[in-house]
Structure formats: C-alpha cells, structure tokens
Amino acid sequence: MKTTNTEPGILNKLRARGYKLTPQRRAVVRALATSDRHMTPAQVHTATREERDDVGLVTVYRTIRMLAELGLVCEISTDGHQRSYLLRRPPEHHHHLVCSSCGCVVDFVSSDVERLQSRLARETGFRIDGHIVEFVGCCAQCRSSAPSPEVVHRQRGIA
Ligand SMILES: [Zn+2]
Ligand SMILES: [Zn+2]
Ligand SMILES: [Zn+2]
C-alpha cells in the first residue's frame, strides 16, 4: 500500500489550507511522520522534545486536531481510555492491526468488512453511518523477538 502522507506532503497540504506552519507545529508533524507507532498526545509531546523544548501540550493537541480535521491522521482507540494517533498512510478507507507490545500499526483494506456492514444494515434495519475496526495483537517482529508465553511459563515454573 503506498504511503501518500509524507512529512513534506502534509506540510504542503497545511500550507495550501492557509495554516501557519510554525516551528512548533512542524515539530509535531515531524514527530508523527517519523513514527510507525500510534502515539498519545503526551507521547507526541515527549517526541517533540528531541527537537525543541518550546512545544506546549496545548499546541500538540491543537495540531493533532487540525490534522484530524483534514483527514491526515488516523485515530487508534485500542487503549480504551485514551485515544492515540498516527499519520494517515492509505488515503482510502481502511482499518488497522495494532500491536499491543510495540504499538506499530499495519493498515489494511477489506471488502469483507464493508460487506458485513451492508449485511448488518439490511438485517437489522439500522442506518449505519460508519465503523471502526481494529485488530489487536502482537506483530510478527515482536513475536519473533519475545519468548512465547509457553516459554515464559516454563521458565517461571523452574524458578
Ligand atoms: Zn490508518
Ligand atoms: Zn510489535
Ligand atoms: Zn471499513
């Protein structure tokens, strides 16, 4: 799946909409653009500190809201109590696989999900306005680097 929202691309879109690209807003965009993990606003705030120390949390929230209004970020709700964000990659409607270990996000498009929505609407009489589909688990990389649950169990048994 091709990535359309690169950091220069995002900045161009913001500029085209008349948003002022302050160094602080740029730092927020960069923090999001250089991560394949979803981040809470607080985590984005921490990441901007690597570049500059004058980005306030309010600026982080405002910049994320601005990006969300333009459809340039995806929202991840896996954690339940706190939303987190990542730069939107596929421009088309898509869903996410979220690793609960490292926080990486894999995008996917599925006609099955869309068909399920039509079927549910038909069967229940609901007017369905949208859906959020997130699959939560452990990514291939984390699975290969971490010991499997059985191994951990066995090691605990020995100790
Ligand atoms: Zn997405
Ligand atoms: Zn992972
Ligand atoms: Zn869908």
Image (cartoon, rainbow, N blue to C red):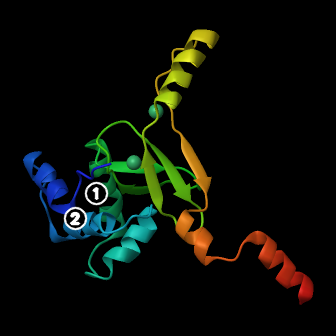
Q: Quadrant of residue 145?
A: bottom right
Q: Is mark 1 within 8 Å of ligand 1?
A: no
Residue positioned 23% across, 50% down in the render = 4
- Kind of element beneath mark 1: helix
Image: 158 above or below 117:
below
In this view, which residue lies farthest toward the front? 144
Which of these two is toward me, 144 or 13?
A: 144
Query: What type is the residue that disc 1 sits on?
Result: Thr
Residue positioned 76% across, 70% down in the render = 149
- Left or right of 153 on screen, residue 41: left
In the image, residue 109 lies at what x, y percent? 42, 39
Q: Is mark 2 within 8 Å of ligand 1?
A: no
- Left or right of 130 on screen, residue 142: right
Which of these two is toward me, 148 or 95?
A: 148
Q: Quadrant of the C terminus?
A: bottom right
Residue positioned 13% across, 61% down in the render = 21
Residue positioned 61% across, 62% down in the render = 138
Tally of marks: 2
User: Which dot marks residue 25?
Assistant: 2
Q: Mark 1 and mark 2 in contact? Answer it, CB < 8 Å.
A: yes
Of callouts 1 and 2, the N-terminal one: 2
Image: 4 above or below 33:
above
Res 158 seen here? yes
Res 80 seen here? no
Q: Quadrant of residue 152?
A: bottom right
Q: Quadrant of residue 63?
A: bottom left
In the image, residue 86 lies at what x, y percent? 38, 57
User: Which dot marks residue 63?
Assistant: 1
As measured in the structure, the alpha-carbon distance from the residue carrying label 1 to the one carrying label 2 is 6 Å
- Kind of element beneath mark 2: helix
In the image, residue 144 lies at what x, y percent? 60, 72
